Image: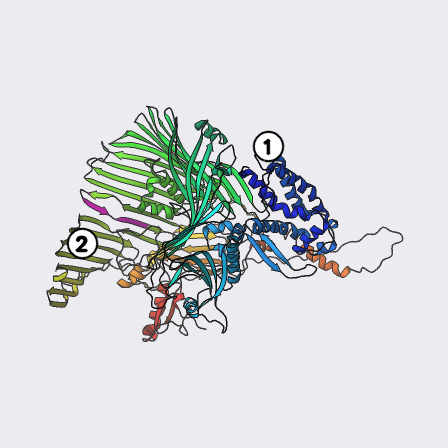
Amino acid sequence: MSEPGAFESIVSEIGKLLLPLQKALDSPAAFQGLLFTLGWKSDSIPKPLRDLAPDIEILFNQLKKLVGGGLSFDGTVTANGGEVNIDLQDVIKTIEAVKNVVEGIDKIVNAPNSDFSPALIADGFKADFPAQLLGYLVNNYLQVHRPGLGFALQALGVTKIRYQPKTGNRPPYIDYKLDFSSIPQLFDNPATLLENAFGWGSDDFDYDLFASKIDDLGMALDRRVVSEEIDVETAELMEEGASIPNGRMRRRMRMIMFERGRTGGRLGADLSLFPLPKTGSKKPGFALMPAFNGGLSVSTELGPNISVTLSSDLDTQGGIALMFRPGSGIEMVLGFDKPGTPVSAKGSGRVEVNFKRSDTTPIPLLGESEGTRLEVVSVSGTTGFELTGSGQVEVFAEVETKGLAFIFDASAGDGFISKILSGLNTKFEFDLGLGINYPRGFYFRGTSNLEIQIPAHISLGPVEIQGLTIAIKPSGDGLPIDVTTTFKAQLGPLAAVVENIGLRTDLSFPGKGGNLGPLDLGFGFKPPNGIGLSIDAGAVKGGGYLFIDTDRGEYAGALELRILDFLSVTAIGIINTKMPDGSTGFSFIAIISVEFNPGVQLGFGFTLLGVGGLVGLNRSMDLDALVKGVKSGGLDSVLFPKDVIANAPKIISDLRSFFPPEEDTFLIGPMAKFGWGTPTLISLSLGIIIEIPGSVAIVGKLTIAIPDERVPLIIINVAFMGAIEFDKKRGWFFATLYDSRIIYMTLDGGLGVLAAFGSDSNFIVSVGGFHPAYNPPALPFPDITRIAINILNTPVARVRVEAYFAVTSNTVQFGARVEIYFGVSIAKIEGHLGFDALFQFSPFYFIISISASLSVKLFGAGLFSVRFKGSLEGTSPWHIEGTGSISLLFWDVDVDFSKTWGDKEDTKLPPISVMPLLVAEFEKVENWTATLENTNQLLVTLKAVDAGDELVLHPIGSLTITQRAIPLGLKLDKLGSQRPDDVNRLNVAVQTTGIEKRKTVQESFAMAQFQDMDNSEKLSASDFEKEEAGLELSITGNQTNTSLITKRIARYEQIIIDNNFKRGVLRFATLIVGLFAHFLKNNTVARADISAKTKDQKHLFGEKITVSANAYVLVSVEDNGPISNVPTSFSSRASAKEYLAQATLDNPQFAEQAHIVRPHEMKKVA
């Protein structure tokens, strides 16, 4: 009698699963028993379930035909078993029968109520019973036939069994449920196993339920499980001071894995489980107490096809416990069995489970039996832990396959794939191990994640199989499994590589069920991740690569061709069919460039080395990412990229970052590359990128190589970028040196320019950075590095010189620093010299801070040092002050000094008259504008007026005059570098009858050009502040006065033609007026675009966020609290400073009592 094959075993398992339903449908009494088990009462079998009986009978007849005499559905082997010839038609009929049974159960939900008793309808039988029946059948099958698997699924939270008390007409029952949604989460967070099933991670961890399932597992494995009391000392050691009610017995559950007698004592292994109560911030958990004594290696049979081997070289001295609590690693406790015994433990313990099959025919796991598929011969498992004397613990479990094979059949691919791999049918054979490790998580043996690459180099004529990849990628409620391979093919002058093509299995757990009940299983062809091509046809050489990411909806490609060694063509492109938010869309970005060698002569030594362009559809430009690419070298991916095939992943990644998808945004960017000299001494790559709508950017690279770019003595590389951002009303430019040197001396440094022309006006130029005390505003480019040259840069000698220069609206700054270092093992010399300078022009004045040091050390101890720190001011007179020190061995000499010399000269520029400047500004026509508020809804169209020199003012418009030469309403100390000689404050007022001031107009002014500031104020003050600059004028009175409104009374005229008409009382006449007013709310006027109702509908939120302009407040120096009788806010620091100065004249002590801060720094008064 032969052993049943894999197919017969599967068929038999289906019969075992459905057997309780078949028996229940044999008689009403049997079905009533099933209903009562599931918590329902019924005197008869409902019609939809009676209709299942014929399908069940057909299904079992087909199952018996397929099983033959080899197996019965109670799992026993019959006497007349033998080989079964399986007919394909019988298989198809069986599948149809299974489908009919499943559909019949699903139809119960939509069956008519008349098919059920009123009691069943009242209790929700139609909605609950189908899922409940499926849960019962699966759980019954697992408990009776596969208890080990049942425990595992219950631990995972897939099967849930809960007792339900009596409610309404329903008797008490056991509720069986299936929930597969947590399986994908298990791969991301293995703790999900305990969280879903037993409340792990909360204060309500159900230890009793967890222990009962461990007990069930022991019984399923035929292991003896006992409950026994544990000694108080051991329990208290693991409970960590938790409060335990008096009189409560502390018990542990002990599973005896193996034991036998031997000379000198017992040889065995057991595992104990003990609850850990909540204590302090620690959540409740459990402790495992393994016990192995001596070297152990014992095998035993658990069934006809299963053997278990226990092995250990662990010998614990004094006992050991592994404590598991949520949110922390495994904690090990030693030495509670034998007080005074040295507490040490090292070694490992393992439990190996082997599934043996007499039939070595492979079992298909994934795919079709005659197509691309994954199959296996046998499976074994190992679980255990490893300990070290240092207390580190790792718990693991592994499943290992033997005879695992992947068969690839190219006929399932598309036309291109089938053409390249025509007729290819190959087989990979290998062994694979999948494991889980705490705390590392899931892994394939030999890797740290759930993706493994198996190298293989199998040549099949023109095709070479390079490797196999297996990947499990949990996502949402799905569990995709990819088994793919990589091929290389040679087709004449064309070589192709197809990467990761193969089989994809999609296992998901939809809430509404799938093609396998609660599961949905699908098989399909896995398209390649990429296809690489190369060509070598003499005149044309090159290659390309196409990246395919169907999950992200992204396709990217790179192409590089060289024609006759004169023309080089490169292309990079990305196409996206999904937008960043996951919605369906389309966008692409492409860069094409052509380079000439030699370049095209343009005259005067200039050559055209290349041309190219960038185009993007539904793509925007990320200026922040692009400017970071200036420093990181990312511009190489945009401007004439080199080796695009080898660098394709980096180039494509950079393009994704620089030009992200965005609806209704377009990019166009011409590029050119120029050179000068033969050979090329100077080359410039330049590109202009225009975003529509949006900003304009210029990117480029400059290279100077002397005398030859192949072996340069001097090489200067500069990457730069500039942009005009119309939405932010600013323009800026940034450049940085990279990979530059003069012979062996390396060069670094950067440059930045910012010109903001919006409400936050600003102007900054910096070469090499800023003065150390200066706090620059937020800049749209990275930090600017010092201009530096490393004259020497070796382990024993370093000489570095750096400098900077900066101009802001308030200051001129520059500085330099030189550092030296010479050292060997026993001695070293190091020092520095540096200065930082701040300048003003009228009167001419500067201050320079200087520091210097030099030290000599022997064997790490100071031998000699000199230090100096001071400042120099000048030039009329000169003033120097500072401190210096000299140290020799144990003697130190410190000297403070201050010296002034030179004649005081008048370096002031001649004064200037302010009033003529303001008058000249007001006489400029361009400073006068006629404006009309945008919020006005004009219902009258006026005649178009030809453009001319005269201003045309709308009847309800206003007249604005403004200027940017002189701030109004503030004291003027200077104008630039000159002092005023006529007035020091200007105000503008209206004296013409019929015109009045509507509001003040403000402009941005650099206040350091108009008021005296000390050095600290110049460094800390805003570059520009909003100050009064003009007026907005309007007609005196109300500009929107109109004639009196017309009121109309609407009445309905009622005409009745009826000779026998008798006027009666209109019972609902009082409602007519209200209805009329109600219907008016949606009339033509209300629905007009300019109506108040339409405006209100466009205001989606009642609350609004407003951004306030910069403001300053005067507060007490004691606690930053408000000061009484002082204005609550000032629009600028200058106006607050002027108020403070005026108040000080009246009260000299006020200057010591108040200071100027931002509103957020003011103390809030309750």
**Magenta region includes residue 744:** yes
Asked if one can make out residue 1083 in the rendered structure from this viewpoint, the answer is no
Is the stretch drawn in magenta largely helix, strand or loop? Answer: strand
**Inter-mark Cα distance, 2 to 1:** 88 Å
What mark, if any, has residue 542 been given in the picture? none
Of the numbered discs 2 and 1, the one sitting upstream in the chain is: 1
What mark, if any, has residue 88 been given in the picture? 1
Asked if one can make out residue 1005 in the rendered structure from this viewpoint, the answer is yes
Q: Amino acid at mark 2?
A: Val
Q: Amino acid at mark 1?
A: Leu
The residue where tag 2 is placed is 818
Q: Quadrant of the N terminus?
A: top right
Q: Quadrant of residue 61?
A: top right
Q: Label 2: state its secondary structure.
A: strand
Residues in magenta, as a range: 742-753
Q: Return the x and y of residue 1061 as percentages of the image width and height.
A: 87, 54
